[in-house]
Amino acid sequence: MLGLSDVPNPGKIETVAPIEIDDDDSSALTVAAENDRILDYHENLAHVLAKQGIKI
């Protein structure tokens, strides 16, 4: 609160080097994204069905 910080230089903005993604990483990211979409679909479906009084 008094300007004291554990951060060595809080005013300095550090840049982060971009990471390279190989084909294996890309495939894993694609699968993870698809899994997220499927989960979202099922959650939305359960919500819609629950609003209609249908329990799954």
Image (tube, helix red, strand yellow):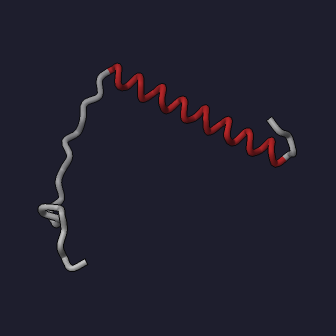
Quadrant of residue 30 in the image?
Answer: top left
Residue 12 vertical placement versus 48 (above, below): below
Instruction: Count the labels in the image.
Output: 0
Residue 34 vertical placement versus 49 (above, below): above
Outermost residue on the left side: it is: 8
Q: Is residue 28 left or right of residue 8?
A: right
Outermost residue on the bottom side: it is: 2
Quadrant of image for the N terminus: bottom left
Residue drawn at x 48%, y 25% is 31
Quadrant of residue 50 in the image?
Answer: top right
Quadrant of residue 54 in the image?
Answer: top right
Name the residue nearer the viewer: 7 or 38. 7
Q: Is residue 21 left or right of residue 36?
A: left
Across and down, in percent, residue 24 comes to: 35, 20
Residue drawn at x 77%, y 44% is 48
Residue drawn at x 18%, y 59% is 13
Name the residue nearer the viewer: 10 or 16. 10
Residue drawn at x 17%, y 54% is 14
Residue 46 vertical placement versus 20 (above, below): below
Residue 3 vertical placement versus 50 (above, below): below
Name the residue nearer the viewer: 36 or 7. 7
Across and down, in percent, residue 51 comes to: 82, 48
Outermost residue on the right side: it is: 53
Quadrant of image for the C terminus: top right
Q: Is residue 37 left or right of residue 1?
A: right
Across and down, in percent, residue 33 comes to: 49, 32
Across and down, in percent, residue 36 comes to: 54, 35
